[in-house]
Image (cartoon, helix red, strand yellow):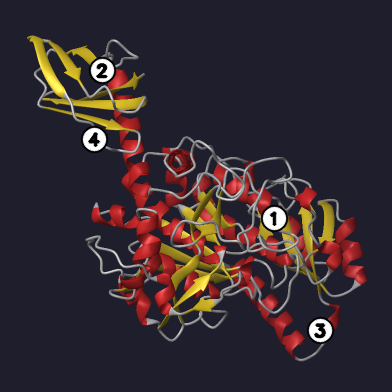
Amino acid sequence: MALNKLKISIIACLFISIANGLNAQTITKYWVKFKDKSGSPYSISNPGAFLSAKSIARRTAHNISVDLTDVPVNQNYINAVNATGAVVFETSKWLNAAIVFVTNASQLTAINSLSCVLSSSQVGRHSNVQIKKINETKEPVTSAYKSTKHVTSYNYGPSITQASQIGADCMHDLGFRGQNMTIAVIDDGFSQADINPVFDSLRNEGRILGTRDYVMGNTSVYEDDSHGAMVLSIIAGNSPGNLIGTGPKANFWLLRSEDVSSEKLIEECNWVVAAEFADSVGADITTTSLGYTTFDNTADNHVYADLNGRTSVASIAATMAVRKGLFVLNAAGNEGGGSWMYIGVPADADSICTVGSVNGSGIHSNFSSVGPTADGRIKPDLSTMGEGTYVCQPGYNFTAGNGTSFATPVLAGAVACLWQAHPTKTNMEILHAIKATATQSATPDNNYGWGIPNMCAAHNFLITQSLNEEFEKQNISLYPNPTKSSISFSLNKTPENIIIIDVLGNHIPFTLNIINSNQYNITFPSDIANGIYCVSIKTVNGLYTSKFIKE
């Protein structure tokens, strides 16, 4: 704690100097990488010293080992850099690096001469045309609303379109609204989220777990840009008749990594630090409506070859976050209609969920950035409503806006609901289920990815999967398999209930024929589609399931 207070004091003094005009133009930010973590007082055998109980629980539940990348940067190395007169602003344990404020060339020379330092590079942040403000064009309220007769547990108002398009309302009706799930929103500020009535329930129920500002080095995020607040409203908003978020009962960390005043590489570094923090405090999901391709210093611009998930520090960290068990979402970008047209960083990262945009009718938005990645992977992964998306602005003003910035939180809230329903599943199993039941699951492409999700179909897919796993433990078989119109099974207990469903959760009609006291036959319509079906059989001993192939 004393070291943290010292760090804050040093940074505060530095900012005061800048404010007073003392050498303001000479301050440069560097990404300094260290060679190792030798001599650290921390040990992976005692993760409680640097990870929260919830973070450790996530790893334990999904058999993820705590390793050396989880161990904080060696404090002796930090002290050595500070001793040069430079200031260590933030550190990255995953990449074993630090963001360092340097005020003159001699400090940099001294840093590079330290035996613990591997390399240093000047850093900065991306430009306005990228995802941070991803074309938040405002449209008339009516443009986002489509009349529906769907009866739900919430009065969604105009936000029903974005919720129902992906089945988020269906999950809500089942009681899954993101309870006890934690989402870290990484963005450019959350203006008035502390007073906006759309977040009343969020604040009153204590579900804002905390805030961090990695641009200024403090915890104040409510006076900065409004983009993050609008993103948050899409997930957590609760204003009946106006806007209901897709994950309205989730918990949140609000993390600022983006500075709207300039475009420099340091924003990627800030994102890394924010993602690490989200992991350490036990977040389940990170959602980011930011992206990087071009910068104020054009020499820093990314080229298409960089979009391989292994070049940018943000993309490397995004993949690492997935390996730590987080579900990571990132906006694809809004360059689809321009000369660049491709996704940005860290949307190119492997294993994350990159989100493109469609309109309320499910048609690809022409501004939505496309893939593939430089190494040939399909991007985006999924597409949700980012055209005419209903949001709440500071001042309790409701409007419709465009951008993959808004498509991403639509999906983030729904993911929280789905994962809440299946807490034993891993992040990758959740992503697989969503892809497997999306509209283009059989024919993914670089406009839609695997298509528009259907969260209740994904929910049924996971139920079927779990039932199959349980059935296989019981060693009960169906025969013949494959079959054309009937299956048989043996069971020493009378079935109390039998259900047959397809992979989308649709119920299939059938007739049960009792052959003898423990032999049964099921016949079903021969004209049902060929494919995989699941049978669940309930008895006094429990629930048994298996799958069969209709050919």
Image position, residue 57 (x, y; %): 42, 45
Image position, residue 546 (x, y; %): 29, 22
Image position, residue 364 (x, y; %): 54, 56
In the rendered structure, are the residues bearing label 1 and label 2 in contact, judged by CB atoms less than 8 Å apart?
Answer: no
Residue extending farthest to the bottom is 20
Give the mark, 3 or 1, whose residue is nearer the N terminus: 3
Amino acid type indicated by mark 4? His
Amino acid type indicated by mark 1? Tyr
Q: Disc 3 or disc 1, which is closer to the eye?
A: 1
Q: Say what secondary structure mark 2 lies in.
A: loop
Q: Quadrant of the C terminus?
A: top left
Give the mark, 3 or 4, whose residue is nearer the N terminus: 3
Residue extending farthest to the front is 527
Q: Say what secondary structure mark 1 lies in.
A: loop
Label 3 belongs to which residue? 24
Quarter assignment of residue 251: bottom left
Label 4 belongs to which residue? 507
Q: Going by the image, does 87 lie left or right of 179?
A: right
Q: Say what secondary structure mark 3 lies in.
A: helix
Label 1 belongs to which residue? 342
Q: CA distance from mark 1 to mark 4?
A: 41 Å
Q: Residues within 10 Å of mark 2 (few under 14, many from 20)?
A: some
**Residue 485, numbered circle:** 2
Q: Disc 3 or disc 4, which is closer to the eye?
A: 4
Amino acid type indicated by mark 2? Ser
Q: CA distance from mark 1 to mark 2?
A: 48 Å
Q: Going by the image, does 144 lie left or right of 331?
A: left
In the rendered structure, are the residues bearing label 3 and label 2 in contact, judged by CB atoms less than 8 Å apart?
Answer: no
Residue extending farthest to the top is 516
Quarter assignment of residue 469: top left
- Say if residue 282 shows up in the picture: no
Amino acid type indicated by mark 3? Ala
